[in-house]
Image: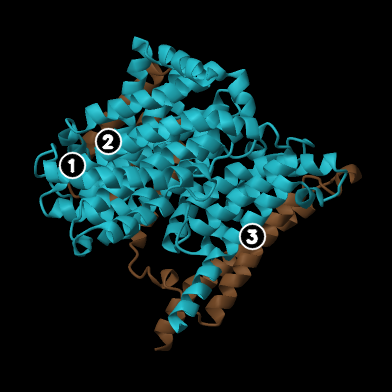
Amino acid sequence: MEMFGALMGGFVAALTPINLLWSFVGVMCGTAIGILPGIGPALTIALLLPVTAKVDPTGAFILFAGIYYGAMYGSSTTSILLNTPGESGSIVTAIEGNVMARQGRGAAALATAAIGSFVAGTIGTIALSFLAPVFVKLALRFGPAEYFALMVFAFTAASALLGTSWSRGVTSLFAGLAIGMVGIDLLTGQVRMAFGVRGLFNGIDVVVVAVGLFAVGEALHIASRKDLREAKIEAVKGSIYMNREEWSRSWKPWLRGTALGFPFGVLPAGGTEIPTFLSYFLEKKLSKNPEEFGHGAIEGVAGPEAANNAAVAGVLVPLLTLGLPTSATAAILLVAFQQYGLQPGPQLFSASAPLVWTLIASLYIGNVMLLVLNLPLVGLWVRLLQIPAPLLYGGILVFSTLGVYGLNRSMTDIIALFVLGIVGFFMRRYGFPVAPAIIGLILGPLAEQQFRRAMMISQGDASVFVTHPISAFFLLAAVLVLLLPWIVRKVGENQAKA
Amino acid sequence: MSGTQSGKRGPGLVVGTVLVAMGAGIIASTAGMDVAPAYARVGPQVFPYAAGIAVALMGVYFLASTWMQTPDRILADTDETDWRAIGIIAASFVFVVLALKPVGFVITAALLFYAVTGAFGSRRYLRDVAIAVILSVAAFLIFTRLLNLQLPAGLLKGLL
């Protein structure tokens, strides 16, 4: 039970006044920026990365823990009041939540989302505290071949399960992978795909790609479509204190959503989208009044929101213990770690154990702080939503430019930002999801490193990937994920025939 | 009738062609590398080749599916595009790249902000100018004084 001691140590470190202040700042900034339409959690963290450059590592990670959960909460508020989900995990929340807001029950929807997020986040963080040491023990037995196979599985899951179509997800993933290869190869020192541009020799910063594809791309996309510029905001009506009936209809979906969300987050299988949809259909199936779904059923907000937040906590398990980001947000968090010279993975738990446990402790604290702050401050958040689109996107572009310039003070970065923004615009226009590109960009070089190491150890014999049992298992799982949609369809056809 | 048909095919052909070109670029750039024979099997070229081939193949897939008229919902979904707004913002990007260092952050950022509000169709010119100036001056001061981030002062050097 050394974990309890370590966690208590984490709490002692996180509960100092200055660190509580960082947590507060993180939760406030995360919510404030995450709530802006079109800005999801990944982008919120990317935009705030340059700001944290001057903070000490402990403070910075407490800040990130606050931003991470705050941004998730902000996104769900936007989907309820504005019906524009900032990330895939809150698409489902928007379905029932926005209907409730239009019926004048917006406050109850926000309340069940906030309390559900708190419940799921807390249970998820507890599960994370218990699971992380187990994963670390497992991960210590992984060699390069196992890591490579695991990443192949994460790749397939990310491209097959994220976004609207398989072909677009794969394209986006490989394009991101190619961008990740630009610059000097770490193992041989050779320059790749720089096309003679000196500024590209050090590669393209992940933050530049994320801000370009997400923020600049989104601004151009909204600018190009007059119909998207004016979104209708629902006023928050009703009491933020849920009544007895709302409580009794909410608590079971919270727990069920948590139980669905956490495992999906832990498995490198595409993050938050699937568990939120599953939770929605589960609640609809279990409800005594399924006809209410689509017309403002509170269970349809409570369940998916809990599933979303539990998955968000779950995603941290592979990220911290294996160094494996399975969502775009986790990928940006990985970059934040690397900025401080820390490489997540099993070694992190031995080399920087106090820091990791402080981070986990601050996840608990951030959750409590979110619950205490958000409902009373809902009026302030709504005012942020009312910023007119011209000013909002003007500000987003100014701060994107500022943030990217602040990274390395390089004009090549600024040019790359705008070029990638235009790429992001066309990706949105033609329905290519951006998240797989970010995952490919960050996982690609990691996977390549493991692949080449494995091949060096085996002296060029590629069979290591199938003769090592763990590695073979992951590769088989990857094939199954690819075949899954096809199998489901076949089974469906057979059932229709019978 | 034929006009709407080609209109629906257009995006698919564009996407496919761009992807094939991109894949070809990646492969060509990788093939041009001088690689020591010791790394011939698992050297720095394996992954770029794989990525290039995959991107090009996806391009071929999009071309083929467009050619065979497999209906593609999303590719045909974007009819109304405000190219004027895109043009204004793209032009202001070029301006930022040219002006950020010589002219300085404050003026460049204010003009970028104002151009974007214009592209989004805002007609409250006075408010937009005021916010553009306040925002860029405030951002400059906060980042240079509070967060110790160096931003180019440009023409306003000594003033701020």
Q: Identify which residue, A406 or A300, lies in the foreground.
A: A300
Kindly identify which residue carries mark 2: B132
Q: What is the CA distance from the residue labelled 2 to the residue labelled 3?
A: 52 Å
On residue A479, the disc is 3
Amino acid type indicated by mark 2: Ala
Kindly identify which residue carries mark 1: A247
- 1 vs 2, front mark: 1
Q: Is residue B142 visible?
A: yes
Query: Under tag 2, what secondary structure?
Result: helix
Based on the displayed image, in which of its 4 quarters is residue A339 positioned? top right
Q: Mark 2 lies on which chain?
A: B
**How far from the left and from the top, in percent, is residue A225?**
31, 60
Q: Residue at x 33, y 33 (%)?
A: A70
On residue B27, the disc is none
Q: In the rendered image, what is the letter of the chain coloured cyan?
A: A
Amino acid type indicated by mark 1: Trp
